Amino acid sequence: MSAPLPTTDLPALCADLARRAKLASRALAVAPAATKNRWLLACAAALEARRAELLEANARDVAAAPGFGLIAAAIDRLSLNPKRVTAMAEGLRQVAALPDPVGEVREAAQRPNGLQVLKVGVPLGVVFFIYESRPNVTADATALCVKSGNAVILRGGKEAAHSNAALHAILNAELPRAGLPADAVQLVPTADRAAVGHLLALSDHIDLAIPRGGKSLIQRVAAEACMPVLKHFDGVCHVYVDAAADLAVAERIVVNAKCQRPGTCNAAECLLVHKAVADRFLPTIGAALERNGVALRGCPETVRLVPRATPATEADYRTEYLDLVLSVKVVGDLAEAVAQIAEYGSHHTDAIVTRDLGAARAFTQQVDSAAVMVNASTRFNDGFELGMGAEIGISTDRFHARGPCGLRELTTYKYIVTGDGHVRE
């Protein structure tokens, strides 16, 4: 392994990172599952053994966070604690326990002429992962990329620079010990934003870009990338409380969807309430949300029923607050709720609360989102919660991958065709 180039020559540095990642990806693509799993388990143990070191590095980032203008929800995403470090380690162990998608036979057939046709899972190659202020994502993304046979180039935000450097040092150190190439996991060693642009131009070496962060970051990556991009722009997620909802269940779901972690992309940003239950439900849910510090921005009917709410603008219904703010609208029926979601939503995660099977079926058929929930919080649209282990992001695209993206979504496939001297007539 050659030493990285100085950061003063940015184009050369980025080209070198990508070249080394491509070389490493070729070795990683044929690494046995047992070798990759050995690395994952060693990394999990190392995270726990070096917890104090991680927390010390993270404390430096958290102390500097107000200077970067981070709001409370963003600082929460940035922060590590012993429980979150343990969760990171457990995430690595869960990825190790998952089936390896590389070499998986997805389809098999024998043609009438005797040709055997297999459709087999293979890695994508090199993933360029750009993300903001969530150091736990460093471990998740690295685990998923390596287990799926992909080299990864990590570009974290400046807000988490110390945390990411400490995490990368731990994860990278275990690669050669497990028999894997050290360049399979690289961290861009500069905060210069121009590095992202240079790397996005290197489609000969980088096969997929994944931005995970604010809308402006994702828009920039989508505009500049010369390779495919796996993405979602917004998480404007809705909870619709139907006329046939169990209102006690609806209250639990709405409070959880908004308040459990308001700074995440699968947190609810808009509450839709059927007019038949609005007068009973809105005063109750308004009080529950107020107890949790949530500010409401509502339609005229909402403001009438919940005087603490302020009038909503049209822009409010399009806003991903990522904070303890919720827009609210009373709708006439399910069709109006679906139309509201189609107009103002982001195809990310939307939920219905109802005891009416027909209403649930209509909602799931008509709402075009990556995940549609029935009587469950939007917060469950998460790879870990859906049994995929960690996730590298959530896609609202329709091509290649949609929803939480885990191991299988980081692979493609090839056809292996075996004959016995076959020639085409």
Image (spheres, helix red, strand yellow):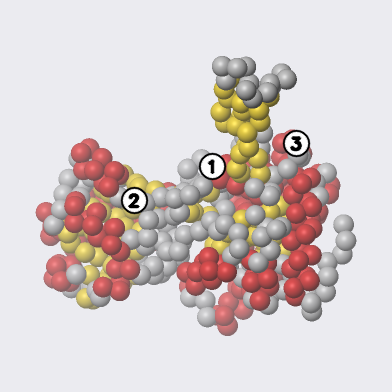
Q: Could you tell me which residue is drawn at 77 percent across and 59 percent down?
A: 19
| Residue contact between numbered discs 2 and 3, judged by CB atoms under 8 Å | no
Visible residue check, residue 266: yes
The residue singled out by tag 1 in the image is: 388
Q: Disc 2 and disc 1: Cα gap in Å? A: 22 Å
Residue 179 x, y percent position in the rendering: 83, 44
Helix, strand or loop under label 3:
loop
Q: Could you tell me which residue is drawn at 57 percent across and 53 percent down?
A: 392
The residue singled out by tag 3 in the image is: 32
On residue 398, which mark appears? none
Q: Nearer the viewer, residue 219 or 372?
A: 219
* Mark whose residue sits in front, 1 or 3: 3
- Quarter of the figure with residue 120: top right
Q: Earlier in the sequence, mark 2 or mark 3?
A: 3
- Quarter of the figure with residue 397: bottom left
Residue 3 x, y percent position in the rendering: 87, 64
Residue 408 x, y percent position in the rendering: 57, 41
The residue singled out by tag 2 in the image is: 368
Q: Could you tell me which residue is drawn at 59 percent across and 51 percent down?
A: 87
Q: Amino acid at mark 1?
A: Met
Residue 158 horizontal side relative to residue 398, left or right: right
Q: Amino acid at mark 2?
A: Asp
Farthest residue, direction front:
425
* Mark whose residue sits in front, 2 or 1: 2
- Quarter of the figure with residue 346: bottom left
Above/below status of 318 relative to 277 = below
Residue 230 x, y percent position in the rendering: 53, 56
Q: Nearer the viewer, residue 289 or 152?
A: 152
Q: Amino acid at mark 3?
A: Pro
